[in-house]
Amino acid sequence: MGGAPLLELRDATVVLGGARVLERLTLTIPDGEHTAILGPNGAGKSTFVRLLTLQQYPLARDEPPPPIRVFGRDRWDVFELRSQLGIVSADLHDRFVHGNSNGFVSAMDAVVSGFFASQGVFAHQRVTDAMRAAACDALARAGAAHLEAKPLAAMSTGEARRVLIARALVHEPRALVLDEPTRGLDLVARHRFMERVAEIARGGTTILIVTHYVEEIIPEVDRVVLLKGGRVAFDGSKREALDAGRLSAVFDAPMTVIGDGGYYHARVAP
């Protein structure tokens, strides 16, 4: 794609509650390079996502360059950034399905709400025909056009997660960030969901997957960054990263790894 990198981190350190959650993290993710950030609980993955979405900032430094740049810029209006960076997460799912006081948010309203960064569409928000047309297109891309009028609360977890992909895509973002996106899905729903993500990757949207599930890493991902204790433990090709020895060291348990059709499956060794 040739644009500024999706993310540049230079010696980025984040301290929360007196503890260093990320420690001098240096990492560049080019625009157009499908990448996975993989690590156990406590590795710093959630803080990494908050850095990327500018909900969290690293410690300031006196000397240039700045510790973080997103698409080449260290300062963004958050609403402007949301049009460039789509987010899908299990936490977002919980807020939509379980956190709405009105109890009814249709797929169409959920997707249109992406234009307003809200959870549903409200009376004071002006929804245009162009917005609804874009929402229809996004639902089709996510394989959820048939769900347009259905409330999220009445959907299966897999259906609702596809609607949230459509919400993330409604702006035609440059990149789609998936933060443990298949949490709560069964094996079949997980596979179908990730196959839809793979189609989006092949369509030209940069995919960044942040997860502790090896199975969420789609075949289109070529690069895997292993995080442990807030540091980069390994950064390289998927084949090298998803090695049983490396994963055993990162997850502090003996692991076995099997490749199957471009996907990998990891298990704790007996």
Image (cartoon, rainbow, N blue to C red):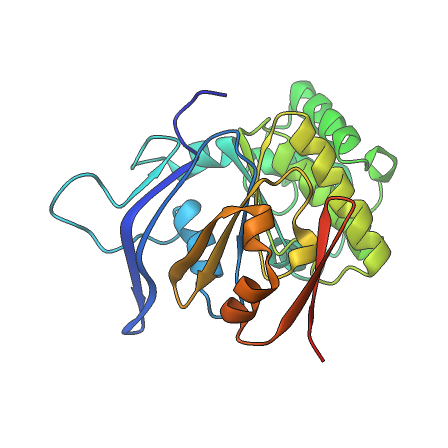
Q: Position of residue 24 (x, y in %)?
A: 28, 57
Q: Position of residue 225 (x, y in %)?
A: 49, 51
- 15 is higher (above) or lower (below) than 38: below
* Placement of the C terminus among the 4 image quadrants: bottom right
Q: Residue 175 sits in which quadrant?
A: top right
Q: Position of residue 241 (x, y in %)?
A: 54, 53
- Residue at 68 percent of width and 25 percent of height: 203
Q: Residue furthest left?
A: 62
- Residue at 64 percent of width and 30 percent of height: 170
**144 sits left or right of 226 in the view:** right
- 17 is higher (above) or lower (below) than 12: below
Q: Position of residue 262 (x, y in %)?
A: 73, 44
In depth, the one of 97 and 269 nearer the eye is: 269
In depth, the one of 221 and 9 nearer the eye is: 221
**144 sits left or right of 38 in the view:** right
How many numbered tags mark residues here?
0
In depth, the one of 192 and 155 nearer the eye is: 192
- Residue at 65 percent of width and 49 percent of height: 217
Q: Residue furthest bottom?
A: 270
Q: Residue 124 sits in which quadrant?
A: top right
- Residue at 61 percent of width and 75 percent of height: 254
Using the rendered image of the protein, determine whether residue 106 is visible from the camera's viewpoint.
Answer: no
- 255 is higher (above) or lower (below) than 22: below
Using the rendered image of the protein, determine whether residue 250 is visible from the camera's viewpoint.
Answer: yes
